[in-house]
Image (cartoon, grey):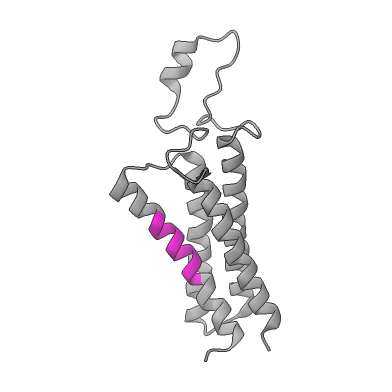
Amino acid sequence: MADRASQARILALAVPVALVGGAYISQYGFGLYPCEMCWWQRYAHFAAIAFAVLAFAAKGPRSLVWLAGLAILASGLIGLFHAGVEYKWWPGFTRCASLVASGGDPLAAIMAAPPISCDQPQWTLLGVSLAGFNFLFSTLGALGVFALLRRAK
């Protein structure tokens, strides 16, 4: 059985690979195209994958695994923010949230809006959007990486 540092390294690679893989399957297999905030979540996972691959290549520097865990956590926190925008808990601050400034031309605002809105979930399961699932899985994955690293010899 692998030691806890090796398990942390495996988890630090498996979580973002699985989540990015799921994102691409939903995009190309089911037509659920990413909005701007979805891409932010992916960028953090891309960084986590890079750190985790470097940790494997360098035979396990714990600092790279910690960085991968932090990148996974960052994606989860972006997912939480994105889910909050979708659930209308707080407003989005990007142009992909469909906010029309008062006094402006509504038609011009609609025409300038990106095709995929950040404040409308494209898919939900039991009321949880993809951003919400990213928050859950990324945060739990990052906490798992951190817990394994803390318990490693």
- State yes or no: residue 98 in magenta: no
Where is 102 relative to 84, above or below?
Answer: above
From what the image shows, is residue 20 above or below residue 147?
above
Magenta: predominant secondary structure element?
Answer: helix
Q: Residue at x 61, y 72 (%)?
A: 145
The image shows residue 3 at horizontal and vertical percentages of 58, 89
The picture quadrant where one finds residue 63 is bottom right
Which residue is painted at 52% across and 29% down in the image?
A: 95
The part of the chain drawn in magenta is 13-22
Q: Is residue 49 above or below residue 74?
A: below
Q: Where does residue 130 sit, x and y in percent of width and height?
A: 48, 47
Q: In which quarter of the image is the C terminus?
A: bottom right
Residue 66 in view: no
Hey, which residue is sitting farthest right in the picture? 150
Membership of 21 in magenta stretch = yes
Position of 50 with respect to 144 (left or right) is left
> Residue 5, percent across and down?
60, 83
- On screen, residue 150 versus residue 69, left or right, reads right
Q: Vertical placement of 23 versus 13: above or below?
A: above
